[in-house]
Amino acid sequence: MAFLLVNLSCSEQIDPEQIPVQTENGNYNSIIEIPAGTNLKIEYDKTSKRFIPDQRNGEDRVIDYLPYPANYGFIASTKSAIAQGGDGDALDVLVLCTSLSTGTVIETIPIGVLKLIDEGEQDYKILAIPAKVSDRTIQSETLEELRAKYPQLLEIIESWFLNYDQDETRSQGWGDQKQAIEIIDRSRVN
């Protein structure tokens, strides 16, 4: 099975640590929190095991900037280790395809990683494409192909993350597929 699509509404409970990092095919399970093209920041709440709007000053957090440029979520069964400079959350992922609903679990192939430092902590963003070819909107399977076919795409994504929030964020550039997979492997929780 090259593609698993599970749509869970904001009210349904899931436990991402019960979903394996990798599929039987060697692809990676990505769980979508924020659909591409939206400004409402949604996060998975570990306590309630639900997707809920992020709160800032007691109100739902709506990004006062351009909408998310890709589907945003996390790699299942991962955690960015605090001891290694991470934030303790699941490893972030950007999935390049049409907008997916919150709670969707999709098989992906990592092709690169945006290496950010956010308020002094590592904040890596894995860049991935759907494993199922017909679900892809970007026809590149490597970071090099992506740069060649869509020369401004990486710059657009990087610029978005450097400007969408008031937090102090800086970029350490892009890493390739090998680096992305190494980061995922270091972040596995099961």
Image (cartoon, rainbow, N blue to C red):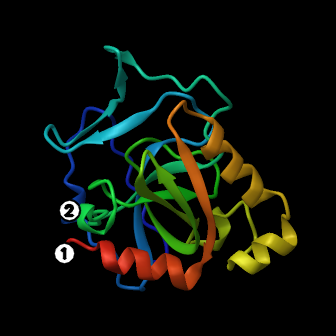
Q: Splitting the image into 4 quarters, where does residue 39 fall?
A: top right
Q: Which label was assigned to residue 190? A: 1
In the rendered structure, which amino acid carries the disc numbered 2? Glu
Q: Are marks 2 and 1 in contact (CB under 8 Å)?
A: yes
Position of 162 with respect to 119 (left or right) is right
Q: Secondary structure at mark 1?
A: loop
Q: Quadrant of the N terminus?
A: bottom left
Residue 105 in view here: no
- Residue found farthest to the left: 47
Q: Splitting the image into 4 quarters, where does residue 8 fall?
A: top left
Residue 152 in view here: yes
The residue lying at 60 percent from left, 42 percent from top is: 36
Residue picked out by circle 2: 17
- Mark with earlier residue (2, 1): 2
In the rendered structure, which amino acid carries the disc numbered 1? Asn
Q: Residues within 10 Å of mark 2 (few under 14, many from 20)?
A: some
